Amino acid sequence: DQQVKQNSPSLSVQEGRISILNCDYTNSMFDYFLWYKKYPAEGPTFLISISSIKDKNEDGRFTVFLNKSAKHLSLHIVPSQPGDSAVYFCAASLTGANSKLTFGKGITLSVRP
Amino acid sequence: KAGVTQTPRYLIKTRGQQVTLSCSPISGHRSVSWYQQTPGQGLQFLFEYFSETQRNKGNFPGRFSGRQFSNSRSEMNVSTLELGDSALYLCASSPGAEQYFGPGTRLTVT
């Protein structure tokens, strides 16, 4: 039972354009969501997070949007850069309970120069 | 601050053997979690330790175990290795909600 789903395995965008990475979840108890970026042969790097009490969080070129009623979140990267090419993981957790993160299977972003 | 470190980075073992992986968290982080990453299953939670106590456990068999020391360093052990245990094992330390990952240990079981 996959509680966090990233249904598109890959995304290709032109440098300078917007990248939109989507994530859906099924467990309505999740109240904290995170995005990680992963390069080959490295561990995931924390990018940005959002609490369920918010619907938007912004950090530089990265913005995460949360739609609780749809159980959907998205990561926007504007403008996209070639160095953003990596695998992006969406993760969810229950705060206050423990540090267990439930991850999606990831989406490979390719930014074309 | 130094990041999360994991040793060794690469390991090759034979079926039936046992293996111990080590993780040093970011200074001041008391929570250490372990994850297994495989191409088919993605990143899956193994267990979490906080102040030397296992606080949460994923759905892995008892062959997978771990511990945490008083300095927050953690080890995980896999006994009676199977071919399916070949994976990237990631350790993450946390001050709270966000987790910060190490580079991982690539385990190959032959």
Image (tube, rainbow, N blue to C red):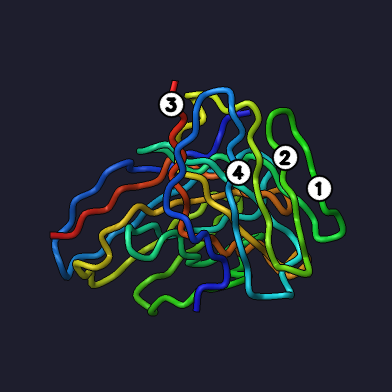
Label 1 close to label 3 by CB (< 8 Å): no
Marker disc for residue A112: 3
Question: What residue is at 79 percent from the left and 43 percent from the top?
Answer: A57
Residue wearing tag 1 = A56
Query: Quick one: SS at disc 2?
Result: strand
Give the residue displayed 61% in from the left and 33% down from the top: A18
In the foreground, B32 or A52: A52
What element does badge 1 sit on? Answer: strand
Disc 2: which residue: A63
- Marks 2 and 4 sit apart, C-alpha to C-alpha, by 10 Å
Chain to which mark 3 belongs: A
Report how far apart the C-alphas of labels 3 and 4 lie in the structure: 15 Å
In the image, A87: left or right of A21? left
Q: Locate residue B6: give its quadrant.
A: top left
Neighbor class of circle 4 (other Cα within 10 Å; few <14, some 14-19, many 20+) is: some
The earlier-in-sequence mark between 2 and 4 is: 4
Query: Taking A87 as reference, is A33 above or below it?
Result: below
Q: Earlier in the sequence, mark 3 or mark 2?
A: 2
